Image: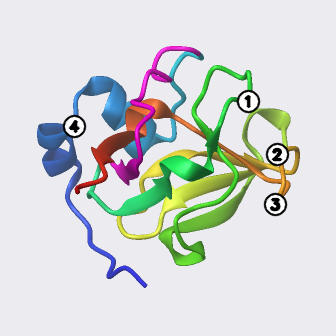
Amino acid sequence: MHEKFTKSEAEWKEQLDALEFKVLRKKGTERAGTHDNFPKEPGTFMCKGCGAPLFEQSAKFESGTGWPSFFQPIEPEAVEEHDDRSFFMRRTEVVCARCDGHLGHVFPDGPQPTGLRYCMNGVALSFEPESD
């Protein structure tokens, strides 16, 4: 389990650019197709807010939605899920378990082995290649 930490709004604004702040701290969404250009080599997708490891490259798949999609997090405790009833919809929000940064949503229409699609905002993630 990741130890929680918090920052003031001013500290987050200093660390993150405007779009990163909008997505991670204000539960915004980036435009589809703007951040699905991550490397294809083995590695780990990390939270842009706190650096916590969230998803492995091996769990990434092409969903056709325009957002990076994964069928499972690196470990169940890496993310937390919350009921989201905004915009007259019912969805499951996914946040970083360490910093509570908004990452995206999870849907039950993904591939096996989980059948889940973690549809993430690419701007909320950074990529760390696997070291040799």
Question: What is the quadrant of the N terminus in the image?
Answer: bottom left
Q: Amino acid at mark 2?
A: Gly
Q: Amino acid at mark 3?
A: Pro
Structure colour scheme: rainbow
Amino acid at the residue labelled 1: Ser
Q: Are marks 3 and 2 in contact (CB under 8 Å)?
A: no
Indicate whether 63 appears above or below 52.
Answer: above
- Which numbered disc flags the more N-terminal residue, 4 or 3? 4
- Looking at the image, which is closer to me, 40 or 49? 40
Which image quarter is the C terminus in? bottom left
Residue 45 in the image, given as x and y percentages of width and height: 40, 49
* Distance CA(mark 3)–CA(mark 2): 9 Å
Which mark is drawn over residue 52? Answer: none
Q: Look at mark 2 in the image and give the residue it sits on.
A: 110
The residue that label 3 is drawn on is 113
The CA distance from mark 4 to mark 1 is 27 Å
Residue 39 is covered by the magenta coloring: yes
Q: Which residue bears the numbered disc 4? A: 16
What's the CA distance linking mark 1 and mark 3? Answer: 15 Å
Residue marked by disc 1: 63
Q: Which percent across, then down, holds residue 128?
A: 28, 47
